[in-house]
Image (cartoon, helix red, strand yellow):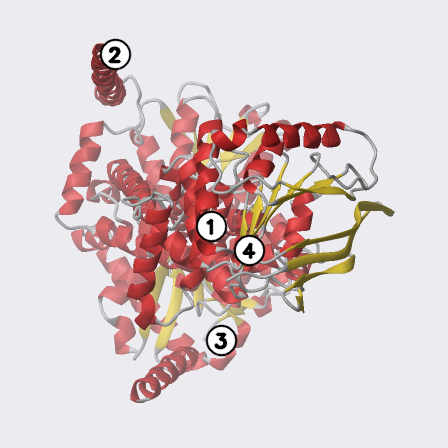
Amino acid sequence: MFVAMRLVLVLLLVHLGVAARAAEPSTLRISVIPTSVLAPLYAALANGYFKDEGLNVELAPTAGGAIGIPGLVGGSYDIAFSNNVSALSAVAQGIDVQLLAPFPDGAADETAVIARKGEGIKTGRDLNGKVVAVNTNKNVIWLYVREWIRQTGGDLSKITFREVAFPQMLDALKQKQIDAAFEINVFVIAAGKDPALEIVSFPYREVQPQVQPSQFVATRKFIQGNKDKIDRFLRALNRGGEWFDANIGKDELFALVAGFTKLPVDVVRKMNFQPVAKKLELAELDKTMALMKREGLLKADVDTKAMIYTP
Amino acid sequence: MSERLGFEHVTKVYESAGADFVAFDDITLEASPSEFLAIVGPSGCGKSTLLKMAAGLIPPTKGKVQLGGNTVSAPPPGVIYLFQQYAKSLFAWRTVIDNVMFPLEGAPRSQRAELRARCEDYLRQVGLSGFENSYPWQLSGGMQQRVAIARALAADPQVLLLDEPFSAVDALTRMELQTLVLQLWERRKFTAILVTHDVEEAIFLADRVAVLSARPTSLKEIIDVGLPRPRDQLATREDPRFLKLRHHLTTSLLAKGSGHVVAA
Amino acid sequence: MSTIGTIGEISRTGARTNRAAQLIGVRLYGLLLILVLLSLWELSARLGWVVSAYWPPVTAILRAAVGELAGGDMLDALASTLRRAAIGYIVGSVVGVVLGILLGKSRVLRLALLPLIEIIRPIPTPAVIPPLILFLGVDDALKIFIVSLASFFPVFTNTISGVAAIDDTLIQTARTFRIGWLRTLVSVVLPATLPAVTAGLRTATSLTLVVAVLAEMIAGSSGMGYYLVQMQYALRPDLMYAAVLYLAIVGYCLNRAFIVLEARFVPWIGKT
């Protein structure tokens, strides 16, 4: 009898604990990908900036980024690390999310098109009749590589796109299963060291120089119910951005990035860290939206102005 | 302990694809207490079905099966069935002794030791001492059927129904098992009903032999065996009366058509 | 007569030793084959026959694997994967056995539930993860659910066909001894179905680990699946292959343990 009562009590407490999580005043649960772009976030965490704001930030790293926005809707996360294209698609589908601005982007644009050295691939025109690898079709990377190809004279109807995971792209290139790949930073560094490969272009920079693809996203409902918490989060995050700017080229930053990405420090040292962007421009979001409409990722305009949350 | 078991105007009709199929029609037959009755008939005549009705496993379409003074509608106590497929009737996950104990497991815990000793004795009676802790699948076919017989004894049978129990073993083992069943029957005096297509087996074991015709099955004749007991595998089988009965029954089974012929 | 018997016995024992020696020989060849392949791998990486960041020499992988024993993230990752796999396996298997027996025994339940189960069965796990996140979140509940779903199907289908395959004679035997339905279920139907259930459990055993890792790769913040992907992105193929090696060892051990337990607890498999 006593045991049964205790069991009921424990179950009740556990249940209350679960119910309390959503209402917990100081906790924020954030879905992240351990990429160098998030260095300001990890800096704010390591330096106790969130604690200073009375926030308890829990990071939930995932290897891919596919579950960020579904996780927001399901209530698993309060904030998700995502990108402008995913957020625009979500809003177009009636999922009411907002971008938290400004987002301190902690790594320079190191996302590049890679090809085999000596094959003369310099522009989109050179890719006609070839196979180009992207990590996922119809995502942000796909969108920008297509736009870059179009702007540099390529004919998209003559180019085959193939989905290859980032870590496998360079091997696929060398085995001639693909002719070009749109790679992310650590692999761009690896390609730079490889005598058989060369960096062709940085499409983000060429297509939309001011764009900030990476973004923190939350649902409007959550933001409205937790304005104070979100503001404190952004304050602490931007302190992380300031620390980042102050430590570019220093061992502290390399150690921090190597720590959360698990990358070897010598790779981190080769990364091209640039001061963080401080502002999310509405015009840039509109440009991305125009690109998406052109590729059929969006059917109609989205109210981009309403999508940006600034304290 | 034994009971009278009677079939009264028993008919079995199967419905298949809209057409009725008469398995057997209006069979009346009775085994007296402690009698050894054999039922022979061509294969496919529904002998096993008749036996399963006696066990309460299948209901008759018309007529009834009477046990003592009661009509059989579900498996009655004291009626034990010995299946032709002994391997499928034994529990592979139980040891030999636990198989024999199976019918007694409803008994109170305090009687367990005594019941176990009794079951060990049944195993001794069927010649399986020393195999208590073996599994059925470690034994030969004949030994497996002995386990099934010991298990039947444990259930304290008043009526033992034997459904071609020796047809799946070799000839020598068959004779051994026949002798064993006769010894047990003489000791325990249960009523025994044997279904078989082996004429010699029927004569060797039974007091009376009922002959069934081919489909639609009916009772063709009943003969008294009248051979002296205890019976012996050599002496009984060489008895001129045995040979005469064998001749008669074989002729009767081979003959086409039905109709009641009462043997002298 | 006795002489013939003796000669027969000698030649039989001789044949047996010969055969045992032969088997050891074959086993040695099997080991040798593995060693040759591993040596080829080592050479191809060392001598540059294969140039890739994802083709480390075998010795580097072994060094990483041994290094992780002294402390590192991998054993923690392995433990959390095994915990999820074990919980999911138990939940899925219990539900599979219970539903398998209920549906195997009841025509009504079969007609009511089987179509639904048959529709869910062919859906590939990765496809259901995003919608499942809406209901189960991204944490343990999701992964455990996916693992239990994966172990449910082999256990369920084997159980239901195992129940269907029980010989009538066995049930009739219980009936003639006037055994009630509950005892018939517990002491006849269940043990008679056990070999089929065991076959299902065995399939599920090898599946659970795979599915747990897969789910962690897609939606994991911990565990071997997350670790594998993280190490790919962190340019640490030696650790990645070391993780694969550990998974292979664990999978092999689970299978061996299963065989031992099977022989110990279900010795009548294949004997009826």
Mark 2 on the same chain as mark 3: no
For the view shown, which residue lies furthest in the left direction?
A: C70
Which residue in the structure is indicated by mark 2?
C1
- Indicate the position of residue B89 as horizontal and vertical percent values: 50, 47
Q: Chain of mark 4?
A: B
Q: Chain of mark 2?
A: C
- Indicate the position of residue B22 as horizontal and vertical percent values: 82, 46
Which residue in the structure is indicated by mark 1?
B186
Q: Which residue is at a point 24% across and 49% down the rendered structure image?
A: C74
**Horizontal relation, residue B226 to residue B64: left or right:** left
Which residue in the structure is indicated by mark 3?
A223
Q: Secondary structure at mark 1?
A: helix
Assess disc 3: are there few (<14), some (14-19) or many (≥20) residues with their C-alpha within 10 Å of its C-alpha: many
Q: Are marks 3 and 1 in contact (CB under 8 Å)?
A: no
- Indicate the position of residue A189 as horizontal and vertical percent values: 32, 37
**Could you tell me how far apart the alpha carbons at marks 4 and 2 are, in whole angstroms?**
48 Å
Assess disc 2: are there few (<14), some (14-19) or many (≥20) residues with their C-alpha within 10 Å of its C-alpha: few
Foreground residue, C84 or A240? C84
